Image (cartoon, helix red, strand yellow):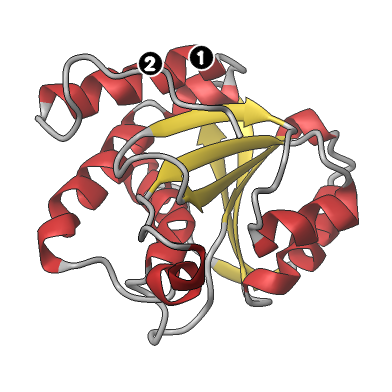
Amino acid sequence: MLLLVGLGNPGSRYAGNRHNIGFMAVDAIAKRRGIGPWRRRFQGVSAEGPLGGERALLLLPGTYMNDSGRAVAEAAHFYKLGLSDVVVFHDEIDLPPGKVRVKTGGGIAGHNGLRSISAHIGNEYRRVRIGVGHPGGKDLVHAYVLNDFAKDERPWVEAVCAIMADNADLLAKGEDASFQNKVHLGMQAKGFLPPKQSQDPDE
């Protein structure tokens, strides 16, 4: 079984926040793949269904971002999953808007959701880093990620979530590089990413 976790904060107050793009991505996968219904479970809401020939559990923790690890650990331990079976979707301020990178392990770059998960289950799980851009100063980050996407950002947000949902089978098959490439090409085709980009740092 594969565990797909979307990071965010529960409740309508946070629903449109940049910090909640992980929720948006996993919700898009559920809708596109007909996975449901959502049920209250594992200190959040979860849904089960097939994905890429595998059984997948989709999880949106209800513990708030800083305690995401509690929900993830409960689900992972229940199904006796290894870290390679856990895929976490989260916002990444160190990537340009709409850029997606997939990696296993590595630093948490100050992300409290990742910090909590690593503390509960270890660090070598898979991460889908979804770029939301940087506000320009470290002191601006907190307010930036806890504010809603601007109206003119919504088209690329919807596009990247849809493209990830279309290609989620590749994650289930362990083809992370192919997934990353498909998302990049899809965003280029829609004009949200330039044709050529310099290599982004992994951290």
Name the residue nearer the viewer: 135 or 164.
135
Residue 82 in view: yes
Residue at numbered disc 2: 181
Instruction: Please provide percent x and percent y for residue 203.
Output: 61, 35
Instruction: Please provide percent x and percent y for residue 201.
Output: 52, 27
Q: Look at 54% across and 46% down and name the residue there.
A: 89
Query: Horizontal placement of 163 versus 169: left or right?
Result: left
What mark, if any, has residue 177 been given in the picture?
Answer: 1
Instruction: Please provide percent x and percent y for residue 55.
Output: 63, 34
Marks 1 and 2: in contact by CB < 8 Å?
yes
How packed mark 1 is, by other alpha carbons closer than 10 Å (few <14, some 14-19, many 20 or more), is few
Up the image or down, 154 lies above or below 193; here it is below
Residue 44 location, quadrant: bottom right
Instruction: Please provide percent x and percent y for residue 39.
Output: 58, 69
Amino acid type, residue under disc 1 in the picture: Ala
Q: Look at 54% across and 28% down and name the residue there.
A: 102
Up the image or down, 23 lies above or below 79; here it is below
What mark, if any, has residue 8 been given in the picture?
Answer: none
Q: Look at 51% across and 40% down and name the residue there.
A: 129
Query: Horizontal placement of 159 versus 12: left or right?
Result: left
Quadrant that contains the N terminus: top right
Amino acid type, residue under disc 2 in the picture: Asn
